[in-house]
Image (spheres, helix red, strand yellow):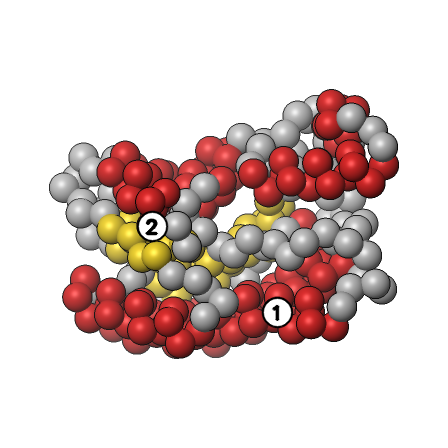
Amino acid sequence: MNLDLVGKRALVCGGSQGLGEACAYQLAEQGAEVVLMARSADKLQAICTRLPARHGQEHGFLAVDAYDSKALAEVVGFELEQGGAIHIWLNNTGGPAPGPANSADPQEYADAFTQHMVSAQVLLQLLLPGMREAGYGRILNVLSTSVKQPIANLGVSNTIRAAMANWAKTLAAELAIDGITVNNLLPGLTSTPRLDSLIAHSAKASGKTVEQVTQVMQASIPVGRFAAPEEFANAAGFLASPAAAYINGINLPIDGGKTGNL
C-alpha cells in the first residue's frame, strides 16, 4: 500500500489544535511538507517546530482568520508564489456555537456561511491550478456526522455542514478527471477542545456535572469511549495518499459506530 507523501505539500487549516494538529503530524510523518494555518501565530509556530521532518521537509505556517476572505486570499496566494503548489488540503474550520436552529439569529447563519463556505471557495480557487498541474490533489473536508444525522442543539452547525457536504460532492464529480479527489471526514465524539466546550455547554444547560454528561455521551458510542485525535488523523492520512486514488465523493464517519444510519 502506497502511503508515501514525500514531495507533496499539505495545507492544514485549523492546524493549531485538535483534529487539525493531529492530521498535520500524520501527514508530516508520511513525508508531506506541511503548511499549518489558523489565527494564532504563537501556537502554530510551536507546533510547526515539533512536526516530523525525517524526509527533510521544511514545514511552515500561515496566521490568518478564515473569516477575512481578502486577507485569506492574500496570505495563501503569497505562500503559493513562494513555496509552490499545495497537493493536499485539509479543509478544517471550527464549528458554530451550539443552540437550537429555531432561535438562532439570522446573522449566525450568514456568519457561518462566510466562515465555512466562502472561505472554502476562496481557497479552492487558489489551490486548484497547482493540483491540476501536478495531476494530484486531495481535498479533505472535516465536517461532522450531522451530515448523515442532525445532532440536537447544533442547529447552525447542522445546516452549514450539510451545505459543505453537498459542495464537496459536486466538486468530486467535477475534479476527478484531473486526478483530484474530494472526500469528507465526519468526526464523531473526539477528545478535542471543541468537544470539551460542547460538554461544558451541555452541563450548564442541564444542571448536570461535566462527568455525568461525559458518561452519558460515552455510553451512546458502541465502542464505549471518545476517539483520540490520532485515530481521526489515520483516516486523513490514508485518504491523502496515492493508495486512496479511487475513493472519491464519500462521507466517512469516524465515530466508533455511533451514527445510526448507513
In the image, taking residue 6 as reference, residue 138 lies left or right, namely right
Which residue appears at 73% of the width and 23% of the height? 211
Total numbered labels: 2
> What's the mark number on residue 41?
2
In percent of width and height, residue 53 lies at 20, 38
* Local secondary structure at mark 2: helix
Q: Quadrant of residue 21?
A: top left
Which amino acid does the dot numbered 1 rest on? Asp
Q: Nearer the viewer, residue 168 or 40?
A: 40
x and y percent of residue 123 in the render? 40, 70
The disc placed on residue 221 is: none
For residue 162, which quarter of the picture?
Answer: bottom right
The residue at the point 20 percent across, 71 percent down is 81
- Crowding at label 2, few (<14), some or many (≥20) Cα neighbours within 10 Å? some
Residue holding disc 1: 111
Sort mark 1 into few (<14), some (14-19) or many (20+) by Cα contacts within 10 Å: some
